[in-house]
Amino acid sequence: MREKHPIDERFRQVLYNGEADPPEVVRAALGAHLNWTTAPRASRGWWPVVIVAVGLISTGAALWAWQKDPRSSIVGGEHRIAEHAAEDIGVPANEATAPGPSIAVTSTATREQETGPTAQTNNAAKDRQDAAMGAGAEESRTGPDKTHRNNAIGDPANSSGPVGTNAEEGIALKSDKQERPETRMDGKAQRNTTTTPARPGDNDLAAATVAKVTASGHVPLSGTPEPPAPITGSDRLAFAEDLRSIPIDPLRIAPEALVPSGTPVSRGPSPNYVLPSGAWWVGASVSFGNVQGTWKGTDAAALQEAENWQSTMQGGLLVGHEWRSGWGFSTGLGIARVRSTFQYEDEIEGSSVLEVDTTWMPTMHSSGDILFSWQIDSLTEEVPGGVVRRDARNLYTAIQVPLLLHWHAEARRLRYGAFGGFNVWIPTQRKGLTLVNSLHDAPPTALALQDPQVDERFSTQVHGLVGVSVGYTINEQLSAYVEPMISVPLVSFDADNTPWLTRPLLQFRVQYELRSNGH
Amino acid sequence: MYAVCLRYARHQLEAQDLMQEGFIRVFEKLSAFRMEGSLEGWVRRIMVHTAINHYRKKAFRMERFGLEHLPEEPVSAMALGSLGEKELLALIAELPDGYRHVFNLYAIEGFDHAEIASMLGCGESTSRSQLSKARSFLQARIERKDVLHHAGKTSH
């Protein structure tokens, strides 16, 4: 049974549906991150959504392309209407268009329809009527046949009706329920009307004209005029001027979603707040293990027999970086010691030793002279040959510079992974005995490891290192690892008689993750 | 979802981190959402699990006190009722990590102790103990705030 507690209740009541707005930087960072990651693959259930989206985008792109076409420009059509209207009523074009060319002509059409027997109006039409004010309206009311040329495009936003498209001439025409009576009675014309959705905005073109067109692009009226010629020369300049005067929001005409994929899109500055890609860490390690050594070179066989490799120990400091993916690298500096026992029986040949004993005696004469009497005795002693056993505990020391690649994964507090890389092995000190063969015919004899004669045996090597890692995160920053690994020599520089030390090791490592500032 | 992250995090930067990580996971797993049930609930679950996993990674210290029943005196309803969302959030943020997560999961998200134990990788008794400790902690803080509030009023 779940216990009730007033504190629980209060917190749940207030905080369960609590809302807070994250800083913009989080959204920006999230967006930035998702842009460079692979988008999730659409599953089968998304196909309908994808199809609808593609359809919408295609429609929008077509609409955008149509609007962008100068021949189908709204203002262009408007301009032509004004021109034709002016010609028909015998007034200059600028008068016919003042204060607004399309408004005047459209107004005429609307009013006629209101008075006509079959006039149909809707709210959009009424709006346009309200917007259609000025003398142009009176002038263009001179006859109904003047208005049938008003193939202008008004503002689709304010029209609830469809918009016609003249495919042949590229002239955008507007169709509405506000039609001329003749037009509306023509059933074919109505059926052939092509429609597109209305576009919001553009109040400057609110009083658009109404016309009905057929699919072929001709107005199906008696005495249908010639199609208006494309705008060229000065007309185009005038059209451009008109266009500039109209406040058009380009985003509404061509929303960002409909911009072709090739269109360059400027992006804002990268967000300041991003998750840290990784963290630096420092660590210390100590390793123990066995050594399997193999001598190479001229005295290899004797050395192999004399030296018995025992153990190795190494320790060092590491610094590394681990990315959020679990991959990382590290390097550092360490010291390694390798121990071995040396046992060799030095063969000594027999020899004879000559010992000489010399004595003298002074004798005093009366004349005052001193006479020395010398006696020399020699003795030859034979020293037999034999075998001298040489024992030593050898110690080799080297500096190590590892360069490792890591990978780690996590399971709760446990971490597991693997690593591998190279370890530069630089011999430094050595103590004990080794063998040298000073004479080719004679067997090798023991010699101190510190002797410069054997310096050349101990040169820099490169070892390969590979291992697995199991760790435990002690707290947020500190973790400890146990890492079985093996170190194998790969390359030795400038050395012939050199020991190749294969070392299986068990490494204990602690790692301290340096705090990240979130950047 | 940011409010959820704020409840589990110790400070705002951590909440931002959690939120970003959570939403990345949401988008990665979006194909796995079967359109059954509430999308908000699904996203919320991911956020909670992201927060829990975040602290598992960081190996927060889960105080293991065993089953303890601390003596609790009910905090006054007036003191509780006077606290708003920001103050309650601040109180939660003051809780140690282990307390905070158990309290969030039990008191606010509505998980039971068995579920919490499974999510946090601890025993049920630990979950109960943590909850009890969290309540005691919150109670002490609320009473202290109440006392300070009254003291401030009388001094004026």
Image (cartoon, coloured by chain):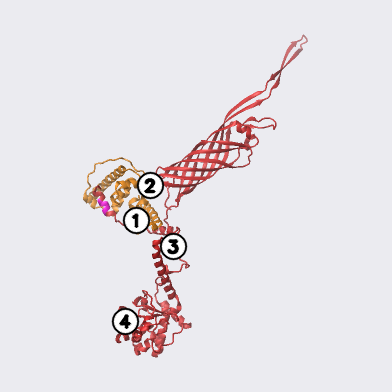
Chain colours: A red, B orange
Residue with the mark numbered 2: B56
Q: Residues within 10 Å of mark 2 (few under 14, many from 20)?
A: many
Q: Are marks 2 and 1 in contact (CB under 8 Å)?
A: no
Of mark 4 and mark 3, the one earlier in the sequence is 4
Q: Nearer the viewer, mark 4 or mark 3?
A: 4
Left/right of residue A55 with respect to residue B77 in the rendered view? right
Secondary structure of the residue carrying tag 3 is loop
Place of residue B36 in the rendered image (x, y in percent of width and height, measured from the top left): 33, 58
Residue at left offset 44%, top offset 62%: A268
* Displayed quadrant of residue A274: bottom left
Label 1 marks a residue whose chain is B
Residue with the mark numbered 1: B42
Mark 2: amino acid: Arg
Q: Which of the pair A150/A161 is nearer the observer?
A: A161
Mark 3: amino acid: Gly
Mark 4: amino acid: Gln
Q: Residues within 10 Å of mark 1 (few under 14, many from 20)?
A: some
> Label 4 to label 2, Cα distance in Å?
70 Å
Secondary structure of the residue carrying tag 4 is helix
